[in-house]
Amino acid sequence: MKPTRPRDLLVAGLITMLVVNVVIRMTYGSLPGFPLLAGATLGVLAVAEAIAGSALRVRIRGDEGSRPVEPLVAARAVVVAKASAVAGAVVAGAWAGLLVHVVPRSGSVTAAASDAGSGIVGLVCALGLVAGALWLEHCLRSPDNDRNPRNG
């Protein structure tokens, strides 16, 4: 399995941003307000994936006192990392699409100012999920792959 390419995540995020921005422009007046912590769940997942990555990295490297990682556990973790990276990129694109619409209006429209805060929290947490997922994926590389410059 090949590592997730950041450019693929960027493309997914940009396409989502454009689509969501168009939808927001057409329907913003009829949407309810966004809760400030609407995107915070992704931040919790980001932290969990970063912690899991660090714990698995120690076990994969075979540090003293650590148990080896079972292959099925590693395979499942890779799947979670890849899916989380794509999901984080898509959700980050969605929050960015909202922000592109509400930030210019936040000085004059109260709802837009409130939604801008929600969008910032959501965007930061979604980008955190992408970072946590990429870290988890990186930590799951075998030590042999880290030594080979062609793998990466």
Image (cartoon, rainbow, N blue to C red):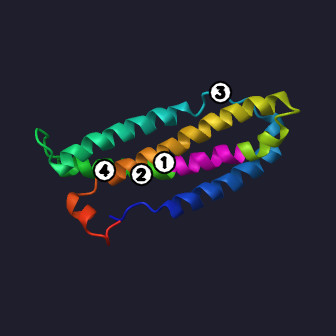
- Label 1 close to label 2 by CB (< 8 Å): yes
Upstream in sequence: badge 1 or badge 3: 3
Give the spatial CA distance, label 2 vs label 4: 9 Å
Q: Is residue 60 left or right of residue 117?
A: left
**Residue at image coords 70%, 48%:** 97
Upstream in sequence: badge 3 or badge 4: 3
Position of residue 44 measured from the top left corner of the image (x, y, whole percent): 46, 32
**Three-letter residue code for mark 3:** Leu
Local secondary structure at mark 1:
helix
Give the spatial CA distance, label 1 vs label 4: 14 Å
- Label 2 close to label 4 by CB (< 8 Å): no
The numbered disc on residue 36 is: 3
Local secondary structure at mark 4:
helix
The numbered disc on residue 139 is: 4
Q: Is residue 71 left or right of residue 3?
A: left
Give the spatial CA distance, label 1 vs label 3: 20 Å
Disc 1 designates what residue? 130
Q: Residues within 10 Å of mark 3 (few under 14, many from 20)?
A: some
**Three-letter residue code for mark 1:** Val
Name the outermost residue toward the left. 65
**Image quarter of residue 65:** top left
Upstream in sequence: badge 1 or badge 4: 1
Position of residue 9 measured from the top left corner of the image (x, y, whole percent): 53, 58
The magenta segment is: 87-98
**Three-letter residue code for mark 4:** Cys
The numbered disc on residue 93 is: none
> Quarter of the image containing the N terminus?
bottom left
**Three-letter residue code for mark 2:** Leu
Upstream in sequence: badge 2 or badge 3: 3
Local secondary structure at mark 2:
helix
